Each structure stands twice: as structure tokens, then as C-alpha cells.
Amino acid sequence: MARFIIENSPPLKGSVKISGSKNAVLPILAASLLTEDKCVIHEVPDQSDVDTMCTLLERLGAGIHWDKNAGIISTAASGKLHAEAEYELVSKMRASFSVMGPLLARLGEVNVPLPGGCAIGARPVDLHLKGFSALGAEVVQEHGNVRARAKKLKGARVYLDFPSVGATENIMMAAVLADGVTFLENCAVEPEIVDLANFLNSAGAEIRGAGTDTIKIAGVKTLSGADHTIIPDRIEAGTYMVAAGITRGDITVTNVVADHLKPLIAKLKEVNLNVSETDAGVRVNYEEGRRIVAADVKTLPYPGFPTDMQAQFMSLLTLAEGTSIVTETVFENRFMHVGELKRMGADIKIESRSAVIEGVKRLTGAQVKATDLRAGAALVLAALTATGTTELSDIYHIDRGYCELAEKLRLLGANIRREEENGEKNN
Ligand code: EPZ
């Protein structure tokens, strides 16, 4: 398995361009199944999760062309589509489950493997299925699969028990071609939801209220093609903003939407870092002599503090002055990075859904493992400041959601290199 070799690095300095958002492009690719016409998607990040989604769409019968240099994917789901998704792909990437809504709406039947749990939690899909039932689908779970059927979905009022991102996206996509009007209440308001709705509306859908807790979807007969540019990845941006803090550096993230970063910006300021919006983007810099101090963080659905930044921010707090409490309210098992950070000398105690962090003077390099995407990123950040060498393995997790992380960090001054399985060094 490939791994990162990371040495203690100087304060990182410079600017870094942020890629398109993984969590926006994945549902948008799935949504392209709703139309027979060609869709062109720009700013597509070169990540392994996008590869998986493209493979899934091709297996379902869609034509996919990905110009990786240009970051453009063209899709054409004009031919006969299959209603069955393969276990191998859905078990590899939960986001594959978002093909369920589009296929149900387009074909009137779909059979998708239940995505099991993952490192960060059980991650059930009950809210998705309740939504499809409310739209009139007959939903059956058997043999590890979910089968849903409906001659024609009918608009309905759907109240989500929890503002789930995935359920909001899946039900919204199903409702786009339904007979009548659907109201999706207590739904997720993440920027990725708005980006999906904008993509669908540019293809002829009638969606209002995305970004608020009630979305109205007036069903239409068919959708046309679309030409859409993906929003920047606020979590990738957040990771580099924390890198500036943890290395006591000065980094500007470019190609970002500052509004999407508000909850993180507030916390970075609270721990005594300077954050400013510039023409180019958002700048985070450490001010000599101003110690980084402890803070309490509670993850919440947007616009609360993002759970996808919890691990990276915890790395920063391990070196802050004082005691911080990080409470994870979105996923029930998202502290897998704690054990690895403690191997690097961090002082952390877990008490049910909170981690109590006593700031230490320094971390030390060690052999550690990425247990999931964001945990991996958090360990990279910790290793940049640790004394000695860190060997980070299982970085395939990181490849799922970051484009060229090592290269981008090296351009900012980091001592990091990628070592392939065969020992080949990859600069
Ligand atoms: C999306 O996952 C993101 N993934 C996650 O990012 C992100 O952490 C999460 O939203 C929350 O922001 C993608 O967009 C591809 P949820 P999703 O449905 O849609 C429970 C990353 O690091 N729930 O909002 O799966 C669920 O178990 C990834 O990029 C139900 O109980 O998140 C969880 O506790 C990780 N029943 C909570 O809701 C359901 O039917 C939030 O899940 C659905 C969800």
C-alpha cells in the first residue's frame, strides 16, 4: 500500500487553489441519470471516489467521458439503463446509493445493495427509504438489497427526522420527475444541496428553496441536458486553512466561497489565528507571539461546524494552550483518529461523544494509519509539526477525497513525499 513519509516542516506559506467539491460532484453525476441528454460538468476533482461513481454509471448503461486534465466529465444516459447497481461498487463507496432516486424516477424500478456501515458510523438509509415510500414507491429490503418500484412517483409532503444530506439529495432527485408537487421539510441546507438543485434546475427541473429547511419540487415530464460548474470544496479549503494554523504559517486558499467557510473561520479566530478575506480568497496566518489557545467545538449540520473538519481541527487543538472539548453529534463513531494522534504524543480522553484534549508542547513522529478520509488528513497535518519522521499508511482513504494533497502541501513548503507499494518514491 502507498504511504506518506512526512518530516517536521517549516511554517507553510503561499497560496493553494482549491478543487471542485467531492460531495457536490458525486450526487450531480448520479443526477445525470435523470436525463437522456448530454450533461457537461466542469471543475471535477481527480479523486478515486469520482472514479468509482463513473464506473457505476457506466455499469448502469450511461456513457461517460472524463477529460482529467481539463477536469471535465460529459455524461450521456440516453441508452437503455439497468435498474440494478452492483454490491462491489456500493460497498466501496456509500455515495453510490444516490443513484437510487434518479433510477427510481427514470425507470420506475431500482435494485440497490444496502450500503453497510463504515469507519465513522452505522450510517443507515431509513430516511431515504421513507422518502421514496412517501412518494408512492413500494420499497422492499431483502437479501442485503433494497428494491423499489413505482409506475409513477407522486408528489408528497416529506418531513425528515434529521436533516440528512444524502436523504435530501436522493429524495429531491426522485421528486424531480414525479407527478405533482413535493415539499421536503427539515431537510439539509448544505452548499452541496444548493449546487445539486442548481444543476437540476439548469436541466429544466423546478426546485425552489434549496439551502433552506423546506424545499419545494414541482415535478416535470422530462429533463434536458446541462452544463454545470461544481462549487469549490469547502472541506479541502478548510484542511489547508488548518495547515496554516498548525504549522504557524501563512496560507491563502483561492477559488473558494468564503460564506461556505464561516463556521470554520469563526473557530480559527477563536483560537487566535488571523483570518481575512482577500481578493484572491481567504488568508489564514499565525501572528508571532500570539499563542494558539484552546476552544470547544461541537459538530452540527450546516451551517454548524462541519463534522468533516472535526479531525483536522482536533489536530490543531492538540497543540493549543489549555483544555478543549470536541463533541461529535453527527456521526456516532468519528474519533478513530484519536488513537493515532495519541501515538504521536497527543493528550486526549474520550468521554462518550466528546473528546477532551489537553494541549501539549509538541507531537512526535510515529508510524500511524489513516482509518478514514478526514482522519487521514488530520494525521498529515499533525505530522507536519511533529519532531522526527511520520510514516502514514492506508492513504488510499485520503486519495478518495483529496487531489494531490502531498504535491499541494509541498508547494507550500511541507516535507512530505508519497511512497508507492513497490518503494518507488513519488514526488
Ligand atoms: C454526507 O454524508 C457527506 N458525504 C459526508 O462527508 C458528511 O460527513 C455528511 O454528509 C454530513 O455532513 C457525501 O456528501 C458524499 P447524512 P451522508 O445523511 O449523506 C444519519 C466526507 O468526509 N442518517 O447527512 O451519508 C447518519 O447515520 C464524508 O467527505 C440516518 O440516521 O450524511 C448520520 O449519523 C464523510 N438515516 C447522520 O444522519 C438516514 O437515512 C448524517 O448523515 C440518513 C442519515
Image (cartoon, helix red, strand yellow):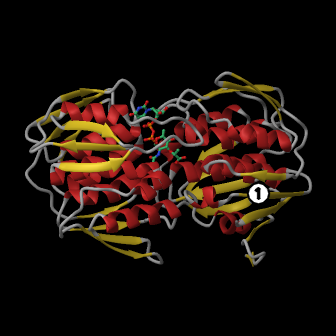
View extreme (front): residue: 143
Pick the residue in front: 235 or 36. Answer: 36
Looking at the image, which residue is at 67% across and 59% down?
395
Identify residue type, mark 1.
Leu
Q: For residue 194, which quarter of the picture?
A: top left
Q: Is residue 272 above or below residue 237?
A: above
The image quadrant where one finds the N terminus is bottom right
Q: Any atom of ligand 1 within 8 Å of the CB at mark 1?
A: no
View extreme (top): residue: 351
Q: For residue 263, which quarter of the picture?
A: top right
Looking at the image, which residue is at 61% across and 33% down?
333
Q: Is residue 7 above or below residue 201?
A: below
Give residue 319's position: percent from left, percent from top: 82, 38
Give residue 261's position: percent from left, percent from top: 53, 43
Q: Is residue 181 above or below residue 399?
A: above
Q: Which residue is mark 1?
A: 392
Q: Residues within 10 Å of mark 1 (few under 14, many from 20)?
A: many
User: Left of 342 or right of it: where is 98?
Assistant: left
Looking at the image, which residue is at 86% across and 52% down?
366
Task: Determine if residue 38 is in view.
Answer: yes
Q: For residue 289, which quarter of the picture?
A: top right
Looking at the image, which residue is at 40% across and 26% down?
162
- The secondary structure type at the circle numbered 1 is strand
Give residue 272's position: percent from left, percent from top: 74, 35
Task: Determine if residue 209 is in view.
Answer: no
Give residue 249's position: percent from left, percent from top: 76, 53
Pick the residue in front: 134 or 172. Answer: 134
Number of marks in the rendered image: 1
The image quadrant where one finds the C terminus is bottom right
User: Left of 66 or right of it: where is 356?
Assistant: right
